[in-house]
Image (cartoon, rainbow, N blue to C red):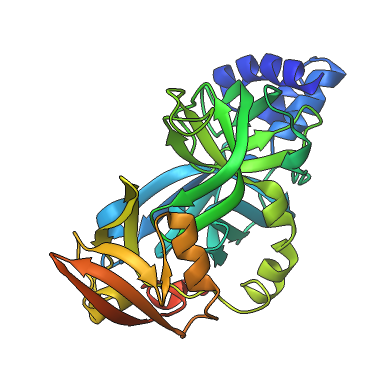
Amino acid sequence: MIVRTLLVLAALLVSSGDAWSQANKGISADEAAAAETLSAVVRVRTRIIPEARSAATLGTRREGSGVLVREGYVATIGYLVIEAEAIEVTGADGKSVPAALAAYDHATGFGLLKLLAPLAGKPLPIGDSRAAAEREAVLVASYGNDGVNVVRVASRRPFSGSWEYLLEAAIFTFPPVMNWSGASLISSRGELLGLGSLIVADAQGAGTQSPGNMFVPAELLKSILEDLIARGKTAGPVRPWLGVNTEEMRGRLFVMRVSPEGPAEKAGLKSGDILIGVGKDEVSTLAEFYRKVWALGAAGVDVPLRVLQGVQVKEVNVRSIDRLEYFRSRQSY
């Protein structure tokens, strides 16, 4: 079983970090196959432009993992690469090459890099995470020492992020791994099931005390990859973005932060406000809020909000934008 051979290979990688050279040093055929699988896992390092919008929350030096999904293309988690002025990708043989940001998709959270020079490694086939049952053993692979860990699927359920982000069926695994950013979730068949996004406290279900990780399902990437390569974006209309970070607490939606100079701030929203509704529809969860906003139309649509500011209910009209318009980047999306 490939999980077992990958674990054997992990011990070899810790000593050398070179999957390709180890595959030629008398190891078994299964271990060589495992080496080939892990050769797709790369390190991603970025330097962010100093004036980046995301610098305050994500910093100007970022590092994580990615995975070869096509010859010359690496998929990773988007927050590692947005607003980057320089990107470096390191392959299984330890050699580094420059890369450019080919696409960022806010709806899924994926970033796609185009390598600017050849890189060792064989692209990993993209699988379907829906085939992975709860409690099934899967592999988390990130670049570097201690980068290969066997975990189990804890649950598949919707995930709502405070940054206007919603997945209908995110993958949650346990126990937690620390190098989760852009890490590859790999099935026993050696297929990519997802990319690491977060560490969470409730992997086995809302309200549980079960630390683990959240992965973005790989089938979401599979459905948009060709568009990202060919056009730098997905086909169809872009979701409206408001620039508001909101948290669910006690059955209410509290505004925790508004993006500086973003649509919500320009419309008068501020930290401490409570979102009550979108138009005439009441909202009390992030999922309700996002779905009501996105149902109004594409980016550029006016979004009527009802907001509690202090003791006064106000109606606020927010002119939405495409989130990519907000970023300051020297790379082309």
Residue 312's place in the image compared with 71, above or below, is below
Q: In which quadrant will I find the N terminus?
A: top right
Q: Nearer the viewer, residue 208 or 41?
A: 208
Residue for point 55% across, 58% down: 111
The image shows residue 189 at horizontal and vertical percentages of 81, 31
Residue for point 57% across, 52% down: 167
The image shows residue 121 at horizontal and vertical percentages of 71, 42
Residue 11 is left or right of residue 280, and the answer is right
Q: Nearer the viewer, residue 49 or 161?
A: 161
Q: Quadrant of residue 10?
A: top right
Is residue 59 something one can see in this rendering?
A: no
Residue 212 is left or right of residue 233, and the answer is left
The image shows residue 23 at horizontal and vertical percentages of 76, 24
Q: Quadrant of residue 223?
A: bottom right
Residue 142's place in the image compared with 48, above or below, is above
The image shows residue 138 at horizontal and vertical percentages of 68, 26
Of all residues, the one furthest to the right in this rendering is: 29
Residue for point 49% across, 25% down: 176
Residue for point 47% across, 72% down: 293
Q: Nearer the viewer, residue 19 or 49?
A: 49
